[in-house]
Image: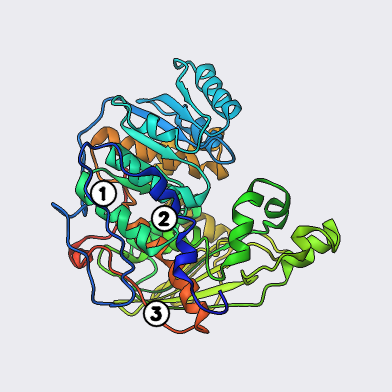
């Protein structure tokens, strides 16, 4: 990109896919506009028939599910779903016939009727989405497919649950927002880290006022993915993004929970951000050491800085640091830190310090007592089965259980399309800021002002 953000090049990975899928579900589909929201910070696209803020839906006795993508994440999500009451998997979809067959067998072994299989082409998922007997489409494909597939599912009248990041460009964020508003279908991002034990414990502490008025948060995705990028599942797509773009390409694991603590889109809003990256060294070094200097991976150039740091300021004057590093040799961490006038909570390892003695962390016994006091009701209710079924320590199960619970009740989900858009907008905005040496950029209010009158996410039981 020669130091500048080439929007046309960036959108080839998303808009090209969307164009190939044309919205074919409705006989007369509404046109989908393209927006960046960047050239004119005051610009807001016109609202649809009604805002999707607080959107509820018809309660469902049985949630009928189709799942797209049975590679790395899909089978795990399918396992979680098959351990939840009030849900039936009717269809499975993947480009590879062997993957759909494996998924169908997984469903049959769980005691449900064998689902219909869709495979063999990149757009066969359209046939599945057009089925009249599905309520929810779960999307677990490579990330450039997330937004186009979620948009198509909603055009077909289906709720969409999409893996992270839900969108890789501002334009796709707006498309999802506008489609959800118009179709009245939910579009929830499957941000499992919002349901982690530590994250929900921190949310409980924030809502109880234990940390006082919140001032600063930190989140991250620090995960050594060099081997997976070079030799595994990510080689065919995630590695290519590392070659082309420099910014935070995966912000939501760390940012999502902090945004919920602070009530982003619900009483507070992102205002501006600045992003910088270190130079890129570790991917090329790893390639040379493992494949030799003549291998294509060793000769490739990588734009993605080893460490990206983004600083966000909110409308209420709070600050958030979000980091991304998938190439350095280091232990895994999401940071998960939140501090206020009454104390500070931090993970990796879990620590807590409270005023007036906040100059030191609580002892292990004191910490255990506080955590027990603030265990979230969702973990109280289904934590035992979540730990048994698994999926990142049980958070995946809690997430899927809660999604099905919301659809059966007809409630709005904990994470709506505006959360998806706000959190995912950091991808493109960080690339833009890095390209301008950390220049501050305005962030986008996808709620068009509705955040001012919303209550922060409550403690659901």
Name the mark nearer the viewer: 2 or 3. Answer: 2
- What residue is rendered at 32% in x and 36% in y? 405
Q: Which residue is mark 1?
A: 180
Q: Quadrant of residue 418?
A: bottom left
Q: Determine whether, in the image, residue 203 is placed left or right of residue 1.
A: left
Would residue 449 be found to the left or right of residue 34 on screen? left
Q: Is residue 252 visible?
A: yes
Q: Nearer the viewer, mark 1 or mark 2?
A: 2
Q: Nearer the viewer, residue 391 or 309?
A: 309
328 on left or right of 385: right
The residue lying at 38 percent from left, 36 percent from top is 137
Q: x and y percent of residue 39 in the render?
A: 32, 77
Q: Is residue 386 above or below residue 107?
A: below
Q: Which mark is first along the chain, 3 or 2?
A: 2
Residue at x-position 25% and y-position 45%: 412
Question: Front-most of 388 and 142?
Answer: 142
User: Badge 2 is on which residue?
Assistant: 15
Q: Position of residue 328 (x, y in %)?
A: 70, 66
Q: Nearer the viewer, residue 111 or 291?
A: 291
The earlier-in-sequence mark between 3 and 1 is 1
Q: Nearer the viewer, residue 327 or 116?
A: 116
Q: Residue at x 54, y 27 (%)?
A: 100
Compared across the picture, whether 431 is left or right of 87 comes to right
Gap in angstroms between the C-alphas marked 1 and 2: 18 Å
- Number of the label disc, if any, that sits on residue 441: 3
């Amino acid at each position: 990109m020669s130091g500048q953000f080439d929007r046309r090049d960036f959108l080839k990975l998303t808009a090209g896919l969307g164009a190939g899928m044309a919205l074919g579900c409705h006989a007369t589909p509404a046109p989908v506009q393209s927006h960046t929201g960047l050239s004119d910070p005051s610009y807001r696209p016109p609202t649809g028939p009604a805002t999707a803020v607080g959107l509820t839906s018809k309660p469902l006795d049985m949630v009928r599910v189709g799942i797209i993508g049975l590679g790395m994440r899909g089978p795990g999500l399918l396992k979680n779903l098959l351990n939840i009451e009030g849900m039936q998997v009717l269809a499975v979809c993947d480009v590879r016939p062997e993957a759909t067959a494996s998924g169908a067998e997984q469903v049959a072994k769980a005691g449900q009727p064998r689902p219909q299989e869709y495979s063999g082409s990149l757009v066969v998922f359209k046939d599945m989405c057009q089925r009249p007997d599905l309520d929810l489409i779960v999307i677990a494909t490579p990330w450039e497919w997330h937004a186009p597939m979620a948009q198509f599912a909603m055009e077909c009248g289906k709720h969409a649950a999409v893996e992270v990041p839900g969108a890789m460009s501002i334009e796709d964020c707006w498309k999802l927002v506008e489609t959800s508003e118009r179709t009245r279908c939910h579009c929830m991002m499957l941000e499992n880290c919002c349901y982690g034990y530590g994250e929900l414990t921190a949310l409980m502490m924030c809502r109880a006022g234990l940390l006082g008025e919140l001032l600063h948060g930190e989140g991250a995705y620090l995960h050594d993915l060099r081997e997976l990028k070079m030799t595994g599942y990510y080689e065919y797509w995630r590695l290519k993004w590392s070659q082309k773009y420099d910014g935070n390409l995966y912000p939501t694991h760390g940012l999502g929970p902090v945004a919920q603590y602070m009530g982003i889109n619900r009483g507070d809003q992102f205002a501006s951000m600045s992003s910088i990256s270190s130079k890129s060294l570790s991917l090329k070094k790893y390639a040379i050491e493992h494949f030799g200097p003549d291998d294509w991976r060793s000769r490739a150039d990588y734009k993605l800085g080893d460490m990206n740091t983004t600083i966000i300021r909110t409308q209420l004057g709070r600050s958030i640091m979000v980091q991304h590093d998938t190439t350095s040799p280091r232990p895994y961490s999401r940071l998960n830190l939140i501090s206020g006038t009454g104390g500070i909570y931090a993970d990796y390892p879990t620590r807590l310090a409270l005023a007036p003695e906040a100059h030191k962390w609580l002892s292990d016994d004191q910490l255990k007592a506080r955590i027990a006091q603030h265990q979230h009701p969702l973990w109280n209710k289904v934590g035992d089965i979540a730990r048994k079924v698994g999926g990142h320590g049980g958070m995946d199960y809690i997430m899927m259980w809660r999604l099905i619970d919301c659809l059966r009740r007809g409630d709005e989900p904990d994470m709506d399309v505006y959360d998806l858009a706000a959190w995912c907008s950091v991808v493109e905005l960080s690339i833009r800021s890095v390209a301008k040496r950390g220049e501050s950029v305005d962030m986008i209010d996808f709620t068009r002002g509705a955040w001012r009158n919303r209550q922060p996410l409550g403690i659901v039981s």
